[in-house]
Amino acid sequence: MKKQLHGALFAAALLMTHLVAAGETAQPEVSTAEGPISIINLNDLEKEAARVLPRGAFGYVQGGAEDEVTMDANATSFNRVQIIPNGLTGLESVSMQTRFLGVDLPSPVILAPMAAHGLVHRDADKATIRGTQKAGTIMAISTYSSVPIKDTVESAPGAPFLFQIYMSRDDGFNRHVLEQATAAGARAIVITVDSGAPGNREADARNNYNYSMHTPIVMDYYDGENVTQTQARASRKVGFTGDDIRTVKQITGLPVLVKGILSPEAAVLAVNAGADGIWVSNHGGRQMDAAPAAFDMLPLIAKAVGKRVPIVFDSGIRRGSHVFKALASGADIVALGRPALYGLALGGSEGVADVFRHLNGELNTVMILAGTPDVEAVKRAKLFDPEKREIIDRSATPPAAQRVVTSYATPVVICE
């Protein structure tokens, strides 16, 4: 049964709204672009998007928490290991094809859940899912989507999607949106557990950006009452346990992925509670600025999980080489975030598809040069640590196995 947003919750939401500097309250102009875009690299794409998006909208999409140390570390952490070329494998071609949640994909790259696509394009999530469909990949729809689930799904019939839930303290809300997502055909549910409190995103304060975007998926539960993202945030569940995973599985009957995992202990807890996948992420550096780079934690989490369930990785992916390194460090699937929204702003659905095509093209090149014929070979690939001058195995090696670490001083065998 739907409820009204009322009482202490509504008061808290109003307080949060007023605490954020009140600017850009009018709906800003958004892109209506639709067509192919030219991409040199995904870092340059960010600069192009900055030229076409309103300052507040761009700051919301691009920015991280506080001093953005964690956000910056997400990108630079990939430089701490290197890919070893191998041109003597007799390789003629490579295949990036993989399968995830019963979906055959042209590459192991999918779209991470993100709020407020309507900030950057008039067609919002509807254009985004058409773009992921053109690219042959999977979109994760956010609780704070700019479009109702049904409308997004109907805009791209047959397109596979996941649904990401920000769980509420209102169990009725959780059941309502989960049942909607299940009925619409979601392949899995993604529970985000790293957002019990909103990150301190100072760029939004500098830009007087006030989080006034509407949240239709949330509004539907509250009988159409206007609910902004700020108000929706005030109702979020703060702490999570294994019971939440079990509850979502019971309501939906779908696989459940737990997103926002940076701790090996949390990963083990989630798997033991029945999680069907672990999503390693620090929310793109948008939550805790004191958190480690997601890539630095990936091999530790992969080792703890021990291949019991698939691992999805996001945070900082901008290059095909980043995708390769993530797969070689224990990930099974890599999720892309902000660059897809930049593609959406610049070219609508075609822009989104072009972002994935470009990243896949880079990955194809790296795989050829590394002598890895397919995704499974990438997962087995060893990387080079230039600081230690060692060839290292960062993959999810089962604990009882041996791995050889080659040092340029002395080769040693490590038993784990």
Image (spheres, helix red, strand yellow):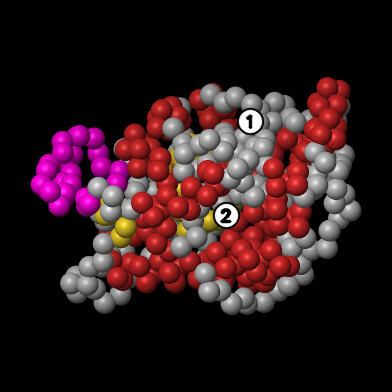
Seen at 67% across and 71% down, the residue is 347
**Which SS class for mark 1?**
loop
The reply to whether the magenta stretch includes residue 391 is yes
Residue 49 seen in render: yes
Q: Position of residue 348 (x, y in %)?
A: 68, 69
Q: Is residue 295 left or right of residue 393?
A: right
Please name the residue that numbered disc 2 is placed on.
337
Please provide the residue range marked out in magenta: 389-416
Within 10 Å of disc 2 (Cα), the crowding (few <14, some 14-19, many 20+) is: many
Query: 285 or 150, which lies in front?
Result: 285
Q: Quadrant of residue 310?
A: top left
Seen at 85% across and 32% down, the residue is 14
Query: 50 or 213, which lies in front?
Result: 50
The reply to whether the magenta stretch includes residue 412 is yes
- The quarter of the picture where the N terminus appears is top right
Residue 184 seen in render: no
Q: Is residue 268 left or right of residue 136?
A: left
**Which SS class for mark 2?**
loop
